[in-house]
Image (spheres, grey):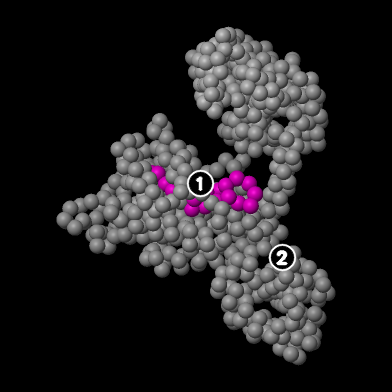
């Protein structure tokens, strides 16, 4: 029997061998660290016996595959610990996820955060017991009998929904048994000491709000304690950077249950930042020949049936509203409206491309568990545009969009990003418009453009829009997973659905191609990104309040007003603190509001026409002539300095 290893070397055996024994034969160190076997490309338990020629990879917790196996095993350990402490709890599902694992559980009485350390202590005992994990298979009826006998209704439902030809496997560790496809570690001891039970959340069974709300216990596990400690440190930093926390402290936005979940409201300072972003991107687009429009936040169901959204995107849309003899929906995106604007006039190749832009209010139904401040809401505002082009204009216009993306990133200091070519999954006929020829043409055209532009990119299957492939620019924030800020999508589908046309050079009627693009993505998400990157300490050009004038006492209010008016007239966003508080208190409060500049004014400043400048970052900068300070701050704003 020949076993081909990852490095291409071959080991020969004259008898069946378990994967773990082969790992030990390769290296005792590898066997001690082994978490997962990949046999002929399939993930298997380490105790899996190999009895014929095969390829074999052994993964440790240093590898993503091995770490998932470790975390999956840790989820079983956590479930066993929960049942020891709460025997009447009912288990649902417990998968490994990107940064840890969780288990959804139905408790008779609500579980509190105070009980999490008890679960963690019980997990330590189970790990120390070094219980082997043993896999076995049951026929469907015996599997159902087990689940019913254990009074595990969620397992009954899971087994019942499995296809008839499914292999129904279970894992046993001591007195604990769980329905699971695996794979797992050899024993509970392999989980080690680098784990932590994190927090609780609510989760509907199978993600359906019509089902019962279960308790989701989140936890994480790593290969080493140092990795766990670094993860926990990053989580603490993420809490400090959380845009929801900072947004509340700086009075940028708020939410209200009476208004509705996922419907944030921007307060004066937040809306000031919003307008800065809106004006910034609109002005850049105008210089590039975009024509901006304003369209309604609703459309008829027929509009979305024509576009295909009703068939492919309805689950993400709000329910329809009947008004007289028409049925409307809140729009999830703006392309159908822009298609109709283009269709309203005749077009020639001479006036293409047509670039229609809009800062557009959109609505999408997001499950409450997915909502996150202004980063992900049910109402948001897109920096949207649709470019109607001839086929031979695709490369040039796409290139201009890419230039605009990276020019914008330069202004905002965004340097850590990657480009992704998002393609359809050909097997998914529900999500994607079913036209193989169209998809092949669109994907090949976009791939060719990206290569001609010399862009480095990766390809991801199943991430395309339902009507066409796209370039996504994914940005890595200071902490947390990467997010998609910008996108440009190539669309041969919707122009045909809306029967769009233009007259070509030979007087023939042709269908245009459409580029869907968003540079800032949604203004809401872009603002959330900026808040978390800067921790609310925006560069001066973006700060809602750029300067705060702080009179030492009421005697110098009049001079404070003069300074304020001088800066206001020059276009600086400035506030005057007229309260009778001590100057130290005023400075500390302005500092906590992360205002770039504080101008302290008293007798000396009034007599000399100066201001005592304090910088948010540099502290006391001494006395400066008022006119000199004004020119300096205006130059900083105009230059969009990121300091």
Image mark for residue 311? none
Number of residue marks: 2
Marked residue nearer the N-terminal end (2 or 1)? 1
Q: Which of labels 2 and 1 is toward the front?
A: 2
Q: Is residue 513 above or below residue 641?
A: above
**Residue 113 left/right relative to 570:** right
Which residue lies at the image location 73% right of the left edge and 35% below the top edge? 224
Which residue lies at the image location 68% right of the left edge and 49% below the top edge? 238
Q: Is residue 9 visible?
A: yes
**Residue 420 left/right relative to 30:** left
Q: Is residue 462 above or below residue 167?
A: below
Q: Is residue 437 above or below residue 398?
A: above
Residue 183 in picture, x, y percent from top left: 61, 22
- Is 299 covered by the magenta stretch? no
**Residue 417 left/right relative to 245:** left
- Residue at numbered disc 1: 364
| Quadrant of res 107 | top right
Query: Observer-nearest residue: 134 or 41?
Result: 41
| Quadrant of res 119 | top right
Residue 496 in picture, x, y percent from top left: 29, 46
Residue 482 in picture, x, y percent from top left: 57, 47
Query: Observer-nearest residue: 616 or 248?
Result: 616
Q: Residues within 10 Å of mark 2 (few under 14, many from 20)?
A: some
Q: Is residue 104 visible?
A: no
Which residue is farthest bottom? Answer: 607
Alpha carbons under labels 2 and 1: distance apart? 33 Å
Q: Is residue 386 above or below residue 163?
A: below
The secondary element bearing badge 1 is classed as loop
Q: Which residues are magenta?
A: 468-486
Which residue lies at the image location 71% right of the left edge and 20% below the top edge? 187
- Residue at numbered disc 2: 593
């Amino acid at each position: 029997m020949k076993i081909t290893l990852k490095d291409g070397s071959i080991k020969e055996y004259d008898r069946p061998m378990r994967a773990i024994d082969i790992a030990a034969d390769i290296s005792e160190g590898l066997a001690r660290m082994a978490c997962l076997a990949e046999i002929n490309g399939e993930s298997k338990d380490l105790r899996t016996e190999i009895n014929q020629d095969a390829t074999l990879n052994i993964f440790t917790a240093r590898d993503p595959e091995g770490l998932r196996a470790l975390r999956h095993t840790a989820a079983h350990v956590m479930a066993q610990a929960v049942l020891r402490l709460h025997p009447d709890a009912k288990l649902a599902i417990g998968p490994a996820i990107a940064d840890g694992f969780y288990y959804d559980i139905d408790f008779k009485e609500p579980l509190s955060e105070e009980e999490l350390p008890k679960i963690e202590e019980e997990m330590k005992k189970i790990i120390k017991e070094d219980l082997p994990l043993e896999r076995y298979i049951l026929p469907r009826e015996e599997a159902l009998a087990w689940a019913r006998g254990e009074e595990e209704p969620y397992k009954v439902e899971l087994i019942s929904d499995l296809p008839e030809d499914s292999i129904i496997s279970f894992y046993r560790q001591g007195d604990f048994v769980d329905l699971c496809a695996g794979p797992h570690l050899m024993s509970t001891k392999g989980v080690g000491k680098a784990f932590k039970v994190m927090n609780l959340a609510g989760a509907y069974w199978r993600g359906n709000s019509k089902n019962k709300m279960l308790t989701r216990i989140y936890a994480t596990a790593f290969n080493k304690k140092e990795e766990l400690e670094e993860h926990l440190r990053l989580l603490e930093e993420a809490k400090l950077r959380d845009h929801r926390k900072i947004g509340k402290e700086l009075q940028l936005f708020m939410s209200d249950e009476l208004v509705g979940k996922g419907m944030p409201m921007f307060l004066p300072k937040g809306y000031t930042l919003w307008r800065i972003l809106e004006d910034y991107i609109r002005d850049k687009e105008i210089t590039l020949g975009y024509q901006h429009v304003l369209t309604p936040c609703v459309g008829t169901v027929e509009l979305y049936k024509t576009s295909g959204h009703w068939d492919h995107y309805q689950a993400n849309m709000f329910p329809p509203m009947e008004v007289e003899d028409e049925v409307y929906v809140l729009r999830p995106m703006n392309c159908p409206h822009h298609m109709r604007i283009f269709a309203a006039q005749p077009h020639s190749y001479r006036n293409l491309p047509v670039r229609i832009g809009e800062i557009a209010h959109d609505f999408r139904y997001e499950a409450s568990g997915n909502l996150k401040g202004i980063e992900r809401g049910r109402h948001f505002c897109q920096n949207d545009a649709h470019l109607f082009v001839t086929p031979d204009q695709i490369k040039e216009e796409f290139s201009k969009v890419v230039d605009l993306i990276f020019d914008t990133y330069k202004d905002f200091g965004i340097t850590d990003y990657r480009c992704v070519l998002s393609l359809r999954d050909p097997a998914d006929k529900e999500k994607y418009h079913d036209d193989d020829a169209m998809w092949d043409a669109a994907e090949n055209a976009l791939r060719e453009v990206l290569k001609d532009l010399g862009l480095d990119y990766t390809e991801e299957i199943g991430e395309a829009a339902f009507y066409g492939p796209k370039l996504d620019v994914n940005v890595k924030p200071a902490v947390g997973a990467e997010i998609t800020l910008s996108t440009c999508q190539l669309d041969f589908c919707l122009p045909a659905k809306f029967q769009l046309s233009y007259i070509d050079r030979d007087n023939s009627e042709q269908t245009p191609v459409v580029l869907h693009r968003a540079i800032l993505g949604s203004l809401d998400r872009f603002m959330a990104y900026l808040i978390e990157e800067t921790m609310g300490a925006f560069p001066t050009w973006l700060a809602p309040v750029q300067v705060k004038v702080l009179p030492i006492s009421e005697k110098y209010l009049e001079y404070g007003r003069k300074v304020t008016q001088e800066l206001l007239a020059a276009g600086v966003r400035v506030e005057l603190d007229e309260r009778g508080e001590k100057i130290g208190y005023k400075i500390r409060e302005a500092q906590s509001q992360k205002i770039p500049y504080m101008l302290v004014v008293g007798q000396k400043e009034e007599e000399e026409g100066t201001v005592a400048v304090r910088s948010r970052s540099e502290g006391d900068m001494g006395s400066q002539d008022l006119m000199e300070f004004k020119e300096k701050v205006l130059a900083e704003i105009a230059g969009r300095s990121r300091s």
